[in-house]
Image (cartoon, rainbow, N blue to C red):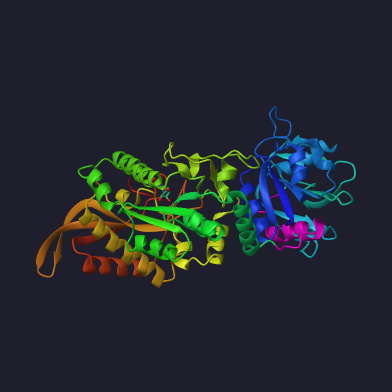
């Protein structure tokens, strides 16, 4: 079994980030709700525990708490912010609300460290940390000593080196803490004794073994969208169970240029049953004359279910329905260590009455960048694994108003040019999502010596962490110029190109 660290989640903003940082050091970890019972924690065999931050005060009536047995496991503990205060509070220290604004700290803070302590070994004595706390430790518990100070906070970090308990008031997981990565590395390697040998190669081997054990002679069905998660899920499952996997790829005709063929090419040579269902004409028929965005979305969702249902009925009984749920969904749903499967995330539009015994989610413990890495490991092409998010309703919500075959063709060409030029300038990582939209505006132009009255294409490029909020990307004018010239010259029916400079909110990423 690989070495694992357990992160107990007290509801802080940066919990996922802690997990990602730990895994970046090659140490496998999981995030569990702080209420996890001690038997489960013990059975997980962690080599160390990390308590996350949290929004509240340890004195709040409903303050998140952990089983008191966590301090008797004989393994190292690192408490971060609330996690540090909880540890101090539970082990006999005194935590109080900051009496004045001076003891309350938010943001970058000059901090002085005791570099003789294992947590800070090898680091400079003075550096900047990121603090965000209202309460502070007025008295450290017996057995602990102070290992870092700031002006406002004389007890910025504490340690009981005998029991290997460490607490920091600041957040080592955020980039603003200058040596945060090194501090986590020290905790993992020097304190917990981690060897950092968790790799995607190991993950792949283990996942394949476990999937084989679980699925046995059973049959698995996967709705493959061509997105990163479902594609990687398909590749992993095909390696594990080969022909006992059937992938149904519903091509609704609303995909980007060549996308359907790329998906097919990526999977047609693998040992699996790949079914590409060409449903373009039935989707277009149902969308004919429909302009209202929500109605369009609904029709696409329903039609998707219908096609998927028809195909699965042809297959007869399947034992497992696989889906590409990934770790952020699991953590956000609070499912942490629970076996409960929150099917709403990815099943979304999947039918209730396709009969199967169980849902399996082979990627449920991976972050997005790890999913991409696994995809590379499994031999998927770079263009597949680094694909940007693409909405389920596809180009239908990027053609404003009624969707027609002709409009889709126009949008596909314009979008392909934009993506091509972004790649040519090496800017594909400058935006988290970028695409073209066919507006329903037509305007007058002059082309050659004649008057034109054609469509306007809008370009959108956004930077975002979570897609809940997004900022428009300041793309270089030269690039925008080249894209505009090419679209107007190469795409019939377009005489104007606009660049969208609205953020989310007040706009959304997509137009419908
Ligand atoms: P909005 O437009 O809501 O988009 O700001 C945020 C992110 O969600 C994607 N999106 C969807 N993804 N099905 C999906 O799978 C959908 O119906 C859908 N609508 C929007 C959008 O592309 C962006 O990444």
Where does residue 90 sit, x and y in percent of width and height? 81, 36
Was residue 237 drawn as part of the magenta stretch in this picture? no
Was residue 183 drawn as part of the magenta stretch in this picture? yes
Nearer-the-camera pick, 384 or 135: 384
Residue bounds of the magenta highlight = 170-197
- Image side of residue 42 versus residue 174, left or right: right
Residue that lies at the very extreme toward the bottom in this rendered image: 424
Residue that lies at the very extreme toward the top in this rendered image: 61
Where does residue 511 sit, x and y in percent of width and height? 33, 48
- Determine the residue positioned at 41% across, 61% down: 474
12, above or below 260, in the image: above
Where does residue 421 sit, x and y in percent of width and height? 36, 69
For the C terminus, give its image quadrant. top left
- Image side of residue 450 versus residue 203, left or right: left
Where does residue 78 sit, x and y in percent of width and height? 76, 49
- Determine the residue positioned at 78% across, 37% down: 95
- Image side of residue 191 versus residue 108, left or right: right
121, above or below 355, in the image: below
258, above or below 95, in the image: below
- Image side of residue 221 versus residue 254, left or right: right
Label count reads: 0
Query: Would residue 94 be visible to someone looking at this image?
Result: no
- Determine the residue positioned at 52% across, 45% down: 319
Residue that lies at the very extreme toward the left in this rendered image: 450
- Determine the residue positioned at 45% across, 53% down: 246
Nearer-the-camera pick, 186 or 320: 320
Query: Would residue 160 be visible to someone looking at this image?
Result: yes
375, above or below 138, in the image: below
For the N terminus, give its image quadrant. bottom right
């Amino acid at each position: 079994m690989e070495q694992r660290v357990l992160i107990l989640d007290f509801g802080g903003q940066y919990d996922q980030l802690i997990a990602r940082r730990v895994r970046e050091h090659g140490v496998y970890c999981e995030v569990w709700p702080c209420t996890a019972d001690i038997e489960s924690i013990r059975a997980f065999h962690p080599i160390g525990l990390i308590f996350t931050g949290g929004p509240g005060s340890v004195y709040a009536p409903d303050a998140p708490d952990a089983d008191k047995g966590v301090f008797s496991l004989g393994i190292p503990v690192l408490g971060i912010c609330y996690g540090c205060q909880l540890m101090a509070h539970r082990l006999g220290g005194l935590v109080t609300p900051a009496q004045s604004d001076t003891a309350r700290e938010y943001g970058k803070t000059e901090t002085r460290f005791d570099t003789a302590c294992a947590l800070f070994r090898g680091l400079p004595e003075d550096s900047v940390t990121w603090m965000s706390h209202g309460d502070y430790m007025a008295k450290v518990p017996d057995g602990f000593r102070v290992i870092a100070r700031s002006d406002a906070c004389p007890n910025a970090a504490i340690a009981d080196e005998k029991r290997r308990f460490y607490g920091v008031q600041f957040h080592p997981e955020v980039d603003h803490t200058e040596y945060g990565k090194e501090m986590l590395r020290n905790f993992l390697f020097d304190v917990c004794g981690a060897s950092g040998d968790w790799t995607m190669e190991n993950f792949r081997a283990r996942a394949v073994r476990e999937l084989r054990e679980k699925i046995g002679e059973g049959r698995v069905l996967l709705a493959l969208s061509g997105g990163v998660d479902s594609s990687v899920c398909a590749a992993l499952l095909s390696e594990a169970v080969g022909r006992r996997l059937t992938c149904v790829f519903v091509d609704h005709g609303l995909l980007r240029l060549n996308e359907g063929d790329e998906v097919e090419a990526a999977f047609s040579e693998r040992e699996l049953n790949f079914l590409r269902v060409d449903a373009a004409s039935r989707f277009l028929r149902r969308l004919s004359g429909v302009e209202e965005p929500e109605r369009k979305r609904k029709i696409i969702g329903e039609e998707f279910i219908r096609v998927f249902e028809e195909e699965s009925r042809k297959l007869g009984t399947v034992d497992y329905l696989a889906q590409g749920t990934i770790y952020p969904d699991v953590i956000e749903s609070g499912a942490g260590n629970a076996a409960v499967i929150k099917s709403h995330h990815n099943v979304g539009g999947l039918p209730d009455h396709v009969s199967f015994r169980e849902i399996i989610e082979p990627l449920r413990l991976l972050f997005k960048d790890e999913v991409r890495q696994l995809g590379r490991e499994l031999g998927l092409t770079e263009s597949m694994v680094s694909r940007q998010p693409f909405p389920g309703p596809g180009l239908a919500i990027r053609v404003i108003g009624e969707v027609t075959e002709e409009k889709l063709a126009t949008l596909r060409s314009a979008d392909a040019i934009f993506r091509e030029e972004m790649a040519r300038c090496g800017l594909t990582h400058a935006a988290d999502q970028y695409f073209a939209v066919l507006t329903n505006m037509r305007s007058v132009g002059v082309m050659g010596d004649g008057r034109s009255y054609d469509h306007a294409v809008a370009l959108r490029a956004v930077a975002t962490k979570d897609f809940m909020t997004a900022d428009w990307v300041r793309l270089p004018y030269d690039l925008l110029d080249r894209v505009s010239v090419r679209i107007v010259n190469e795409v019939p029916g377009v005489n104007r190109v606009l660049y969208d400079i609205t953020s989310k909110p007040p706009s959304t990423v997509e137009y419908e």
